[in-house]
């Protein structure tokens, strides 16, 4: 198979949702249909005793939530599918936002009982910024929920996108009978408890087939009325409008019962985009280019705690990645060879010899990589649009076991390399301040430091309103400011000077009183600093 065919085979997408909408459960069922696993697990279920493949960290299994993006690859319908399961909770949103830069399309999960929730809207806004194609899966049809027509109206209004149902539920809750596939005009009958794959498709000759009456009774009448209304108000599905991010097809089902997932997956593989082009600071990179390039969108420490391994996840954007070949680490201007590149299914990994645009691979890393780093075959450019957010919550790291100081230092260094927390060190008193976008991150850090590094700690409240990087053309002015605010000056992991403002009022005053000092609030400042050092 040639290079162009390999690109056409790839489909790389993320599953996103508000917490508890059923995102990770849907991921498991897609893996089940893809043959990647034999029995699906569940995030929270009294009936299913197996844990999920995507929630592989101990704290995820204990809390019943995803706290890190999982990468999973499998084959389906002759295609190579790269699926990224993301955290739903807003405290872990930074990981999700970054993951959205590494995919070509998205499946958005909505709870039919709760409808569109806050985090769903936030995630959709990120998709809209990049015109990412979105398919919506309305989940939990086995529960009594909102009217499907009401849900369609809410999806259009709150998500600011045209929607078009490609499947339609036949009742819901205790009387849920199944879904009618508007795309290929087939009937799927509901059987609860779908832990393994089962064939429940009924071949019919359109909506007027008498088989509908025999199978559904009075519900067939309502289904025909609904389908007539849908077809009268919607044009035939426009694949190009979907690919432009203007139209979102909608599917209905119940992920926990393995229902409605197969037609979602079948349609996804038929219409979802192949790998697309990516902007850099120099030019746009096309996937068809023969020269390799890719970027780091995620770093995970201790994927296997027994080996203390650190993995940098790379989205391949162009060319062919080859094991043992030298590639240029652009930021460091250094050539590196990778002897054990890996593909993933949650925590399970397999060594690979080659990979193509759209693929997500893991590279063993000894500390060379940071989020947003670019690899090429020699050309010097950096991929853009990989965000780093200013922290919103700040706490001081306190060591509870002085004999484990080295383990604590190593642990916090490696865990903050993952990009979901930032570490600032105050020279005065050598205090370590950790900043995150949400308080739950501190629980995860504390748990992982103890269980992965054997270092007990606590996080104390700290009076920091904002961390901002400061620069000045005049070194004397910089020294003067740092001396005046010495108790609020820290450095980040790259050695850049940071001002930890105790309040918005103080920050405003400092900006006015020291016009020679530049105060920076975004990651673009750090990128500019890196580029100036190149």
Image (tube, rainbow, N blue to C red):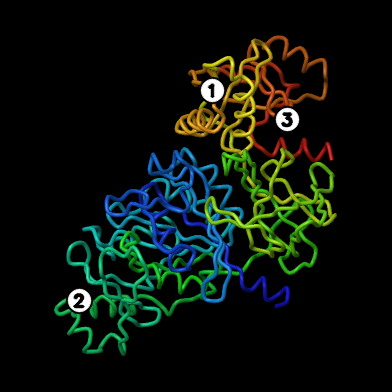
The residue sitting at 68% across, 27% down in the picture is: 492
**Quadrant location of the C terminus?**
top right
Residue 494's tag is 3
Does residue 167 lie above or below 142 as drawn? below
Which secondary structure lies at badge 3?
A: loop
**Label of residue 465 in the image:** 1
Q: Which residue is mark 2?
A: 222
Q: Give the Cα distance between marks 1 and 3.
A: 21 Å
- Left or right side of 281 for 252: left
> Tag 1: Cα neighbours inside 10 Å, few (<14), some, or many (≥20)?
some
Q: Is residue 201 above or below residue 268?
A: below
Res 81 quadrant in image: bottom right
Residue 383: percent from the left, percent from the top?
72, 51
Helix, strand or loop status at disc 2: helix
Front position among marks 1 and 3: 3
Is residue 317 or residue 65 the one in the foreground?
65
C-alpha separation, residue under disc 2 versus residue under disc 3:
63 Å
* Quarter residue 111 falls in: bottom left
Number of numbered labels in the structure image = 3
Q: Quarter holding the N terminus?
A: bottom right
Mark 1 or 3, nearer chain start: 1
Query: Residue placed at 32% from the left, 86% from the top?
Result: 203
| Residue 29 x, y percent position in the rendering | 41, 62
The residue shown at (35%, 69%) is: 260
Expressed as whole percent of the image width and height from the top left, the position of residue 117 reads: 36, 49
- Asked if labels 2 and 1 touch by Cβ distance under 8 angstroms, the answer is no
In the image, residue 473 lies at what x, y percent?
A: 82, 25
| Left or right: where 504 falls relative to 250 | right
Mark 1 vs mark 2: which is more N-terminal?
A: 2
Could you give the CA–CA distance between mark 1 and mark 2, rounded to whole angstroms? 57 Å
């Amino acid at each position: 198979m040639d290079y162009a065919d390999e690109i056409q085979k790839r489909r790389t997408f993320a599953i996103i949702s508000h917490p508890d909408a059923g995102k990770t459960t849907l991921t498991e069922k897609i893996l089940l249909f893809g043959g990647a696993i034999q029995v699906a697990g569940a995030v929270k279920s009294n009936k299913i005793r197996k844990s999920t493949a995507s929630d592989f960290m101990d704290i995820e299994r204990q809390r019943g939530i995803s706290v890190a993006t999982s990468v999973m690859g499998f084959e389906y319908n002759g295609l190579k599918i790269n699926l990224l399961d993301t955290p739903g909770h807003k405290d872990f949103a930074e990981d999700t936002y970054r993951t959205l830069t590494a995919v070509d399309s998205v499946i958005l999960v909505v709870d039919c009982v709760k409808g569109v929730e806050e985090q769903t809207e936030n995630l959709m806004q990120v998709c809209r910024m990049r015109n990412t194609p979105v398919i919506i899966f309305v989940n939990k049809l086995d529960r009594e929920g909102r009217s499907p027509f009401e849900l369609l109206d809410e999806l259009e209004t709150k998500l600011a996108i045209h929607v078009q149902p490609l499947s339609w539920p036949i009742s819901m809750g205790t009387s849920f009978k199944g879904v009618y596939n508007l795309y290929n005009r087939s009937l799927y009958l509901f059987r609860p408890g779908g832990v393994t794959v089962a064939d429940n498709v009924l071949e019919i000759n359109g909506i007027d087939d008498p088989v509908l009456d025999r199978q559904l009774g009075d519900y067939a009448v309502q289904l025909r009325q609904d389908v007539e209304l849908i077809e009268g108000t919607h044009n035939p599905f426009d694949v190009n409008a979907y690919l432009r991010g203007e139209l979102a097809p909608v599917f209905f089902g119940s992920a926990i019962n393995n229902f409605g997932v197969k037609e979602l997956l079948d349609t996804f593989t038929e219409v979802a985009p192949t790998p697309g082009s990516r902007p850099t600071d120099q030019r746009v990179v096309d996937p068809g280019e023969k020269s390799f390039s890719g970027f780091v969108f995620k770093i995970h420490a201790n994927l296997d705690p027994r080996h203390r391994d650190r993995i940098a996840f790379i989205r391949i954007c162009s060319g062919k990645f080859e094991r043992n070949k030298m590639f240029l680490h652009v930021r460091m201007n250094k050539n590196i060879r990778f002897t054990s590149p890996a593909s993933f299914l949650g925590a399970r990994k397999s060594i690979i010899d080659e990979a193509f645009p759209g693929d997500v691979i893991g590279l063993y890393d000894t500390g060379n990589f940071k989020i947003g780093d670019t690899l090429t075959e020699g050309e010097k450019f950096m991929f853009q649009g990989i965000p780093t957010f200013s922290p919103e919550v700040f706490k001081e790291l306190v060591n509870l076991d002085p004999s484990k100081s080295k383990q604590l230092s190593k642990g916090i260094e490696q865990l903050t390399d993952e990009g979901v927390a930032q570490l600032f060190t105050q020279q005065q008193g050598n205090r370590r301040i950790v900043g995150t976008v949400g308080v739950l991150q501190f629980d995860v850090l504390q748990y992982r430091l103890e269980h992965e590094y054997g270092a007990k700690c606590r996080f104390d409240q700290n009076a920091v309103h904002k961390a901002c990087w400061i620069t000045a053309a005049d070194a004397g002015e910089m020294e003067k400011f740092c001396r005046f605010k010495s108790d609020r000056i820290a450095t980040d992991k790259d050695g850049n000077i940071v001002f930890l403002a105790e309040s918005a009022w103080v920050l405003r005053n400092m900006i006015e009183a020291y016009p020679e000092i530049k105060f920076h609030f975004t990651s673009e400042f750090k990128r500019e600093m890196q580029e100036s050092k190149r």
